[in-house]
Amino acid sequence: MRILIATDDVERSRAKWRYRGQERPPFAIKPEAHQLSVWDFPRPPRIENFDGHHLRVEFGGQIIARTSQGRRVLETAGAPTYYFPPEDIISKAIERTGNSFHCEWKGISDEVSVATAKHAGWVLESVYQEFSKLYGWYAFYPHKLNCFVDDEQVGAQPGGYYGGWVTRDLVGPIKGEPGTENW
């Protein structure tokens, strides 16, 4: 496992965020009893075990990944991102693309494609210490694949860049729309 050390550039990037989950801004939707507000999620992000729920990813009628031992990352203003342990990846159609990208909180991820679905997800390959529990775990974009929490097919977080899964119990507004870059 490669553990990354936060550089001054990374620390500056982390410091730019205006909202950090301590209180909801005035424009946030107030959740009802059965709802979660993305504005109550923390920054820096938090990893939660998501045991007891069934996560599933499908493409072209085939199951790509399935787990009841998933983890999710909660971050202020974003929909949760769900991660699958490598042993619960079912499809042989997952291929690394050779492209990588950096998250100032989690680390460096290798992009993956699933069959003809290009840029369909990622696997964390180099992590900051706080996210070492996700080393080698996979996440998928619901705007590229069919993603489910229990029996609910989720929607995609706005903007195309983020991998958040929007469930019906989530209220926002959710980061990803134009003008939300520094939320």
Image (cartoon, rainbow, N blue to C red):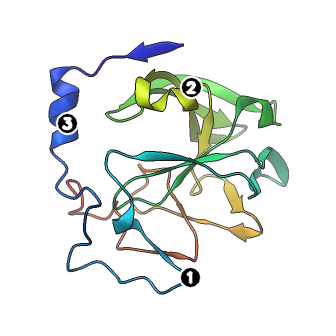
Residue 165 vs residue 6, the one in the foreground: 6
* SS type, badge 2: loop
The residue beneath circle 2 is: 135
Q: Which amino acid, by three-letter code, is at mark 2?
A: Tyr
Left or right, residue 134 beside residue 172: right
The residue beneath circle 3 is: 13
Residue 116 vs residue 82, the one in the foreground: 82
Q: How crowded is mark 3: few (under 14 residues within 10 Å), some or many (20 or more)?
A: few
| As drawn, 115 above or below 147 | above
Q: Which residue is drawn at 40% across and 25% down?
A: 128
Residue 112 vs residue 80, the one in the foreground: 80
Question: In the image, residue 161 lies at what x, y percent?
Answer: 41, 49
Q: Which residue is drawn at 36% across and 84% down?
A: 30
Residue 34 badge: 1
Q: Residue at x 78, y 49 (%)?
A: 68
Question: In the image, residue 58 lies at what x, y percent?
Answer: 76, 52
* SS type, badge 1: loop
Q: How far apart are marks 3 and 1 (CA)?
A: 34 Å
Q: Which amino acid, by three-letter code, is at mark 3?
A: Ser
Q: Which amino acid, by three-letter code, is at mark 1?
A: His
